[in-house]
């Protein structure tokens, strides 16, 4: 529903100066497959994601003046391209909100890492403003906004731990998974462009399609394999079966990312040789491993020698 501007204005004057702080979590893609492409150029994806305990912090303060301003510990994020700014602007427009906001973004989730930091920031900003102004916005409406803001935003609106996402990432199917997993995230301090990764994938896919068309049986087998992996992974997550989780995990974008940055493939090989399951997350440059027991990685000094950023996180 739309709120009458006069009522909102009265409420906003009373709330001026009030603030709220919320944590903005990251996510890991345990499975990511690109199943097609839409006419508008966006890709049709199928992905299983897990929310994890790596957080940015967002503080929103209500202002009497109508403008929006964004401040951050990373100065390059203090602009109108920031998803916090875009999210607040969208909410103001849709709900006819007259007041403005000062938004403080404490950035801890690496940028361009495939961890969903920007999408999470967008969702968290809107949720913070809704709480501040005591608004009642149905989830289905938030999902419509999320589709305008970015592919993973709706997952963070859903506030579930595990979900299967489809389409452009805006169709959210929560998974009834009670398991709590621990991960090691390795970020080699490379900021990857999602657009560049998908463009490279398209180039590689064209070549692959030409090969697959020569053998229809093989093409059918590839599709069956991916469908089976989704089922295997969901089954494994519900039972916390580590071997099956590793078997079902998959990221179609690995090949394109590794072709752009060979160093990332070298990291994966490096970890595999030391007995770690390792996979790329999302369309960024971070890799992750599943920790099966306490101190499984022994605080590995070999990671630190490479000057990679290391995060030990859990699902929640």
Image (cartoon, helix red, strand yellow):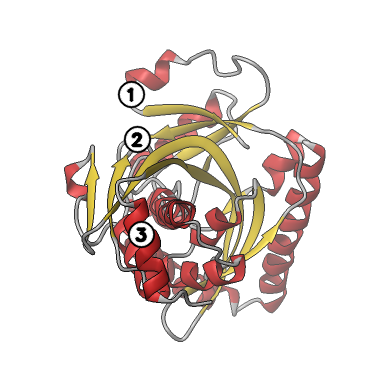
Q: Is mark 1 on a helix, strand or loop?
A: loop
**Residue at 50% across, 47% down:** 281
Quadrant including the N terminus? bottom right
In the image, what residue occupies the spot 42% across and 55% down? 129
Most foreground residue, 236 or 226: 236
User: Residue shown at 41%/48% (left/top)?
Assistant: 117
Q: Which mark is residue 188?
A: 2
What is the x, y in percent for residue 194? 37, 59
- Residue occupying image coordinates x 30% and y 37%: 189
State how far apart marks 1 and 2 are (Cα): 8 Å
Q: Is mark 2 on a helix, strand or loop?
A: loop
In the rendered structure, the answer to whether residue 236 lies left or right of residue 192 reads right
Q: Looking at the picture, tell me which residue is in the foreground, 288 or 142.
A: 142
Vertical order, 40 against 246 (above or below): below
- Going from the N terminus, do you reach mark 2 or mark 3 first? 3
Give yes or no for contact between labels 2 and 3 (Cβ–Cβ under 8 Å): no
Where is residue 252? Give x, y as percent: 54, 58
Give the labeled residue for mark 3. Answer: 12
> Could you classify mark 1 by the number of other residues whose Cα lies within 10 Å: few (under 14), some (14-19), or many (20 or more)?
few
Is 31 or 8 nearer to us in this picture? 8
């Amino acid at each position: 529903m739309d709120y009458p501007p006069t009522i909102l204005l009265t409420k906003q004057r009373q709330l001026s100066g009030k603030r709220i702080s919320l944590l903005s979590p990251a996510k890991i893609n345990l499975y990511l497959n690109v199943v097609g492409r839409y006419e508008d150029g966006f890709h049709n994806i199928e992905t299983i994601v897990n929310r994890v305990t790596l957080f940015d912090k967002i503080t929103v303060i209500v202002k009497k003046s109508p403008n929006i301003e964004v401040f951050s510990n990373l100065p390059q994020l203090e602009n109108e391209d920031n998803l916090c700014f875009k999210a607040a602007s969208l909410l103001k427009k849709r709900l006819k909100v007259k007041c403005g906001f000062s938004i403080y973004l404490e950035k801890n989730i690496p940028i361009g890492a495939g961890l969903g930091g920007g999408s999470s920031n967008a969702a968290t900003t809107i949720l913070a403003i809704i709480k501040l102004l005591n608004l009642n916005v149905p989830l289905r409406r938030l999902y419509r906004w999320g589709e305008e803001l970015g592919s993973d935003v709706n997952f963070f609106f859903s506030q579930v731990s595990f979900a299967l996402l489809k389409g452009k990432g805006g169709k959210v199917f929560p998974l009834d998974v009670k398991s709590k997993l621990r991960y090691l995230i390795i970020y080699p301090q490379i900021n990857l462009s999602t657009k560049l990764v998908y463009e490279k994938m398209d180039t590689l896919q064209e070549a692959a399609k030409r090969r697959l068309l020569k053998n229809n049986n093989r093409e059918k087998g590839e599709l069956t394999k991916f469908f089976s992996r989704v089922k295997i992974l969901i089954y494994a997550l519900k039972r916390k079966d580590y071997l099956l989780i590793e078997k079902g995990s998959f990221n179609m974008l690995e090949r394109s990312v590794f072709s752009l940055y060979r160093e990332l493939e070298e990291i994966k090989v490096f970890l595999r040789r030391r007995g770690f399951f390792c996979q790329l997350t999302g369309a960024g440059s971070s890799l992750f491993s599943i920790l099966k027991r306490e101190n499984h990685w022994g605080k590995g000094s070999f990671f630190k020698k490479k000057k990679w950023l290391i995060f030990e996180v859990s699902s929640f």
